[in-house]
Image: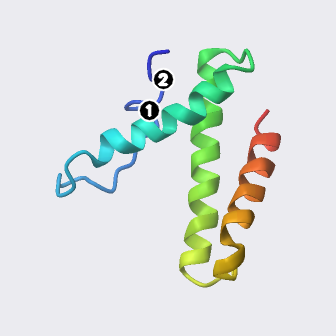
Amino acid sequence: MENPCRGSAGARINTEGKFPGFDTAVADDLQIFAVGFAGTGMAPGIVIDRTAVFASALQGVITQILHGRLRVPPAKAKAFDADVCKMLIKGTR
């Protein structure tokens, strides 16, 4: 499957090019989500939208954890992240 996310939902953190390969790595990661959504039979435009919403929501949760506004004990972080991903996927179907 051609990457429907390249250029449409990619990160803009690397605007000065200080991190070679960063934008490609982000696009490749988004591709994993896009392939999952495409596997449900969604139209390509919807796949792109769902992937962008999923990635944005997950980024928001991670930002809240990193800034200490959402407290997750390190020992429970992996399970918490998995639960968040399950909820986000369920909500974007």
Residue 46 drawn above or below residue 15:
above
Image coords of residue 41 (percent x, y): 73, 15
Disc 1, SS: loop
Q: Which residue is mark 2?
A: 4
Residue 28 drawn above or below residue 12:
above
Distance from disc 1 to disc 2, alpha carbons, whole Å, reads 8 Å
Disc 2, SS: loop
For discs 1 and 2, the disc positioned in front in the rendered view: 2
Residue drawn at x 39%, y 48% as measured from the top left: 11
Image coords of residue 84 (percent x, y): 74, 57
User: How many residues crowd mark 1 within 10 Å: few (<14), some (14–19), many (20+)?
Assistant: few
Residue 41 drawn above or below residue 35:
above
Image coords of residue 85 (percent x, y): 71, 51
Residue 50 drawn above or below residue 14:
above
- In this orientation, which residue lies closer to the viewer: 86 or 52? 86
- Would residue 77 be found to the left or right of residue 16 on screen? right
Residue drawn at x 78%, y 48% as measured from the top left: 86
Circle number at residue 8: 1
Tell me the amino acid under the disc marked 2.
Pro
Tell me the amino acid under the disc marked 1.
Ser
User: How many residues crowd mark 2 within 10 Å: few (<14), some (14–19), many (20+)?
Assistant: many
